[in-house]
Image: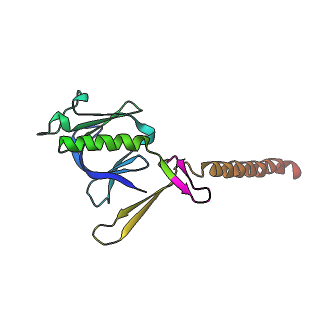
Amino acid sequence: MALLRSGWLWRQTLILKRWKLNWCDLWIDGSMCFYKTDTRQELEHRVSLKTACVDVRSGLECGGVTLPESNPRENLIVVQLRDGSTLNLCTNSEDESIAWKLTLLEARRNLVFTYDPYDDSYQAVPFNSYHAVYITPGAGTGTHQVVVQRDPFDGVAEQLAMGLLAGMAEGAAMRSFLWMPFFFC
């Protein structure tokens, strides 16, 4: 999985509306991950831009957002989400803000192409945020950490079918116990 951009960003929290400095990774599948430190040990927040992002605004396009102290409005990035909420980000410079905005827009619509050597063609592969493998460097150890994300609803149908089957078996067993008193009379 390719990393499009990473770096330090100010992120406004959803409930208390205070600004926190987070390390941010933006992956090619549209996943934007926020960590406490650049070692990527503790994931604080994750947004899937492919499914949740509606619009990205920056600088003077953003109104009604209080900025962290000593930061001009040109450093602000506002990501509008489908549920009506916003993800408010702030960079350290106007150039970084423009670069982050362009990268966010690219990640939102970016397709990944696979090459098929048999017919010498490329095919667009839509990414979902599940069944993705992320490889992150280990914290100064020279090793790599592999994170595999799976769909949380994967296997629900099988579990539901097994539950229905167990319920039917239990019902059949209980029905036979109900007839038992008539056999001894």
Q: Is residue 184 magenta?
A: no
Q: Is residue 118 magenta?
A: yes
Where 168 falls versus 74 (above or below)? below
Q: Residue 107, located in which quarter of the rendered image? A: top left
Most extreme residue toward the left is 70
Image quadrant in which the N terminus is located: bottom left
Q: Position of residue 90 (x, y in %)?
A: 22, 41
Q: Residue at x 39, y 65 (%)?
A: 145
How many marks can you see?
0
Most extreme residue toward the front is 120
Q: Residue at x 14, y 39 (%)?
A: 71
Q: Nearer the viewer, residue 109 or 75?
A: 109
Res 112 seen here: yes
Region of the chain picked out in magenta, as a range = 114-127
The colour scheme used here is rainbow
Q: Nearer the viewer, residue 24 or 172?
A: 24
Q: Position of residue 39 (x, y in %)?
A: 28, 61
Where 176 falls versus 70 (above or below)? below
